[in-house]
Image (cartoon, rainbow, N blue to C red):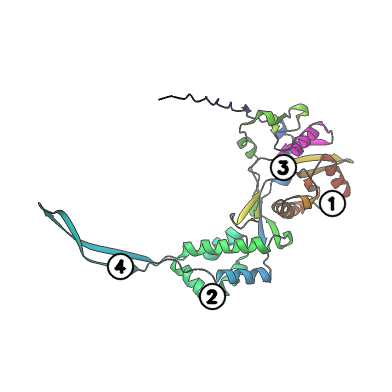
């Protein structure tokens, strides 16, 4: 038999990575601390449901299938052993009985309020206007029913509630904030080939930043070089704004992580800016999901802006000229 030799496939070398270090002097810089104070407050959102969305939601909820019932099956068997026949067995008795289980009813409205962002009064109205069988299903199988109701609300919202004007943000109680410790928590290895040294001028809390697109790369380079930029950072991945999910297959509460934050000096005034870089500043050229996130994020930052008028959310931003143009126009977030 002829044995054929197979060529060895060379193993690919892993691309080198490096881990960023914190520039503590920048983190402790008064201007950076002021920037973080302005952009770190936590918010929650509430959705206002249109009549059309509510009717559609009720219509879909009424299609809920009954949860499967539990049952107990028991059988009695008779076994016999003989030298001639071996082991033999036969069922001599048995039955299948339905099993009724009573579950404690959880805080249904509270659970749906937290997971959907809808008001308690809205959830109550939706449930009370549904077919009575829906409430019976909740009693019989709370876990199944809550999951089904939440999914239905998500699907309806994805269809009707993509417009930002239906969403309102409010600050959380007791001045809750994103912790500045998230900068230290984000010190994870990055691909060396996609990093830029940021130690120059001491304006960034990291000794280098990674970039994912040419737009990000160019923006970082301009932040380093422009004297108008007093401090800047790429926002940690854990800096996530809560937003409604705009995909009916996602969880009900989505998140949005903007790209950059900086302090920009213009005509003697210092502005706090959060920037989302894109290769195009035309909303028509962005995916619907990207546009939706940006429009909803504006609501979040307008809420923060109520206590700091020099805060601006600039998105989508193609290049640094647009930051200056936005601030010159004194746009509303």
Callout 2: SS: loop
Callout 4: SS: strand
Q: Determine whether label 4 and label 1 are within 8 Å by CB.
A: no
- Residue 259: x, y in percent? 72, 42
- Residue 51: x, y in percent? 68, 71
- Disc 3 target residue: 259
Give the magenta part as a residue range: 210-237
Cα–Cα span, label 4 and label 1: 70 Å
Q: Determine whether label 1 and label 3 are within 8 Å by CB.
A: no
Q: Is residue 68 visible?
A: yes
Callout 1: SS: loop
- Disc 2 target residue: 131
Q: Nearer the viewer, mark 4 or mark 1?
A: 4
Mark 1 and mark 2 lie on one chain; the one further toward the N terminus is 2
Callout 3: SS: loop
Q: Determine whether label 2 and label 4 are within 8 Å by CB.
A: no
Q: Is residue 91 above or below residue 268?
A: below
User: Could you tell me how many numbered marks the image carries?
Assistant: 4
């Amino acid at each position: 038999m002829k044995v054929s030799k197979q060529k060895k496939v060379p193993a690919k070398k892993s691309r080198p990575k490096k881990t960023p270090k914190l520039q503590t002097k920048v983190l402790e810089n008064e201007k950076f601390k002021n920037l973080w104070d302005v952009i770190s407050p936590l918010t929650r959102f509430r959705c206002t449901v249109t009549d059309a969305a509510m009717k559609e939601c009720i219509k879909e909820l009424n299609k809920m299938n009954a949860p499967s019932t539990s049952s107990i099956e028991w059988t009695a068997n008779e076994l016999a052993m003989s030298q001639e026949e071996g082991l033999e067995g036969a069922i001599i008795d048995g039955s299948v009985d339905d099993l009724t289980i009573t579950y404690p009813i959880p805080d249904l409205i509270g659970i749906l309020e937290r997971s959907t962002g809808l008001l308690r009064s809205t959830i109550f109205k939706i449930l009370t206007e549904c077919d009575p069988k829906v409430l019976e299903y909740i009693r019989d199988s709370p876990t199944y029913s809550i999951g089904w109701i939440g999914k239905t609300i998500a699907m309806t919202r994805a269809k009707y509630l993509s417009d930002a004007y239906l969403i309102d943000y409010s600050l959380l109680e007791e001045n809750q904030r994103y912790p500045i410790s998230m900068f230290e928590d984000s010190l994870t290895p990055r691909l060396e080939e996609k990093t830029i040294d940021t130690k120059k001028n001491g304006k960034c809390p990291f000794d280098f930043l990674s970039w994912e697109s040419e737009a990000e790369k160019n923006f970082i380079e301009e932040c380093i070089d422009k004297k108008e930029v007093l401090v800047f950072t790429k926002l940690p991945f854990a800096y996530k704004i809560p937003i409604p999910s705009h995909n009916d297959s996602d969880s009900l509460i989505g998140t949005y992580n903007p790209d950059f934050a900086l302090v920009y000096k213009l005509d003697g005034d210092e502005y706090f800016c959060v920037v989302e870089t894109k290769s195009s500043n035309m909303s028509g050229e962005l995916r619907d999901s990207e546009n939706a996130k940006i429009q909803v994020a504006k609501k979040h930052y307008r809420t923060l802006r109520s206590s700091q008028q020099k805060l601006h959310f600039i998105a989508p931003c193609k290049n640094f000229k647009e930051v200056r143009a936005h601030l010159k126009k004194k746009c509303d977030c």
